[in-house]
Amino acid sequence: MSVIDEVKQKLDIVEVVSQYVTLTKAGRNFKARCPFHEERTPSFFVFPERQSWHCFGACGTGGDVFSFVMKQQGMDFGEALRLLAQQAGVTVPSRIERDTRKDERERLYQVNEATAKFFQDQLLHSTTAAKAQDYLSGRAFTTDTVSAFQLGFSPDSYEALKGHLQERGFSEKEVLDAGLLVEADDGRTRDRFRGRLMFPIHDARGHTTGFGARALDDSLPKYTNSPQTLVFDKSGTLYAIDLAATAIRKQDRVIIVEGYMDVITAHQNGFTNVVASMGTSITEEQPKDSWRTFNEPRKPAGIETGDIESERTKNISTRQINTIRRLTRNVILALDADTAGEEAMLRCVDYENILDAEIRVILLPDGNDPDDVIREDPQKWQGLLSDAVPVVDFTFSTKTARLDMTTAGDQSRAVHELAAIIARMKDAVRRDHYIRRLEILTKTRYNIIEGIVKEYMAPSRQSKPKREPTTTQATQLLISNPLEEYCLRLLLHYPELINMSEGLLPEYFQDSQNREIFITWQQVKDLSLLKDNLDPTLWEQLDSLISLDVIDNKVDDKLANVVLRLREQYLRGQKEERAAVLAAAAEEEGIGAKLDEEDIEGNNRLLEIFKEKGRDHRSRKGWT
């Protein structure tokens, strides 16, 4: 039995959910107001017999005990497993946990927290912080805002912070490992941040992971971050996610801006679902500063680690999108003209595939940041948010606005540039929609555009990476859902099937570990990269799936069959849940009627599956 299955066996979902919401009996099940959105009528149900939960209201989502904790706490699968394993009294073996540096990480959190308090104390009480205080006053930041964001000031000294931390029991190595010191070639160290306004950076759980710093004079770079450390990775970090998570979940929307000040001003004016992307810097190859004397002038822009103001939203990473996906699927990007480049738009389409939802954008007035707009008129900012448009629509408008659609050359250019974007969409209906729109814009026949789109899609269809030989294991892990496991084995062994998996949805995988593996597989599309992108707690399951070979004839037919059966399994499960809830929910206003409508729709979808099965005379055992 795997650790994951052992945790499931020892924990009752009702007891776990009760830690976060107040459940009341509803027949053999339990109900509550959904913790993931505002509502007056309970639409959130827990099913003890199935060990599952489902929201029949605005969320429309559900899952097992792992998916609930992941959504409630904003955790990834590994974090949820560790939390639940602790509650169940189950030890996560070191070969799976792979967390030998846990104590070291905890120590770095402590170093960073002590540093944040030191910097804030300097800002509030040091006479040398006058420039920083004046800057914040000029921005009209309140004392509550300064406190909430833990803003601070780093003294213009080479050893002030180092001495302070050593007095509190932290070693020089720990301070260096936290990225707070810079080491010379001769081994001497000095404070990394000096004479700057400081922005502590936290993860979703509130741990202080690193710092951003703004120069208060002409020093360069204007903005700089902590280097990458054991606890800080700017490519996976969203500034203020700890403060914004509740509002994002409650409003079911996140707004991503470009800088610290944009976020802070937004929050002070009531827009608390705003975060900033910490882009991946082009200079990340240089992990730490190189300096020879204490008198050496500060380095020009680009030498120190990443600048949140220079790389901006165009470098939102897959890890950041996955963090957001656990809170909401509704994303608005606040872009300036420089950020809204072609590369940014292509990435946004990839992120839409991950989110399974449209990303919307607002284009800021020339020369204005969100900070400028909000301070001038918060209602104007609200209007920009209301007028946000889908990113692909935005791209169509900006590209065609620069071209003359009466000329054959510009028509061809528009078709090819926009077809490349359409080809990245995994949803066939969306592709069709935008092909038709491009047909109207360029006066080019649909079949011609469709052919060009298929040409851009062709490389991924033709690519067929060689599969490394696998070794059959003598024993197999406990399988909680054989159909899900077989589907994953097909996808893992035959990467070319990705183009046949459009109808396969994450929610068809009822087991959270299988769902996480499927979602990650969709994102990386490369078996060699899959393990590196999975939490170590899922490696055991992945190894088991890869080690079990599958018959290599008619794998496309087998996948079509298993996708159909997974969809049927999913719809039947929903039907059973609705049936269990109908009686208990009859007295709740609106819920019964909504469930009746959903039941009719579900029956129709099941009927479609039965008809498709009737047309297909393949054996029901074709997947074994």
Image (cartoon, grey):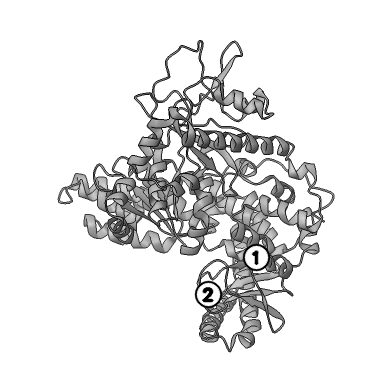
Q: Residue at x 74, y 44 (%)?
A: 97
- How many numbered badges does the structure rendering display? 2
Q: Residues within 10 Å of mark 1 (few under 14, many from 20)?
A: few
Tell me if residue 611 can be seen: yes
Q: Position of residue 142 (x, y in %)?
A: 41, 47
Residue extending farthest to the right is 474
Side (left or right) of 15 relative to 413: right
Does dot 2 land on a helix, a strand or a loop?
Answer: loop
- Determine whether label 2 and label 1 are within 8 Å by CB: no
Please give the residue where the numbered disc 1 appears in the rendered image: 20
Label 2 crowd (10 A; few <14 / some 14-19 / many >=20): many
**Is residue 215 placed above or below 579 in the rendered structure?**
above
- Quadrant in the picture for residue 213: top left
Please name the residue that numbered disc 2 is placed on. 57
Q: Residue 305 has which mark?
A: none
Q: What secondary structure is marked by label 1?
A: loop
The amino acid beneath tag 2 is Gly
Between 277 and 118, the one lying in front of the other is 118
- Residue 564 image position (x, y, % from top left): 59, 68
Residue 299 location in percent, x, y? 42, 19
Q: Residue at x 58, y 47 (%)?
A: 206
Q: Is residue 485 above or below residue 535?
A: below
Note whether residue 619 is visible: no
Left or right of residue 1, residue 447 in this image: left
Residue type highlighted by circle 1? Tyr
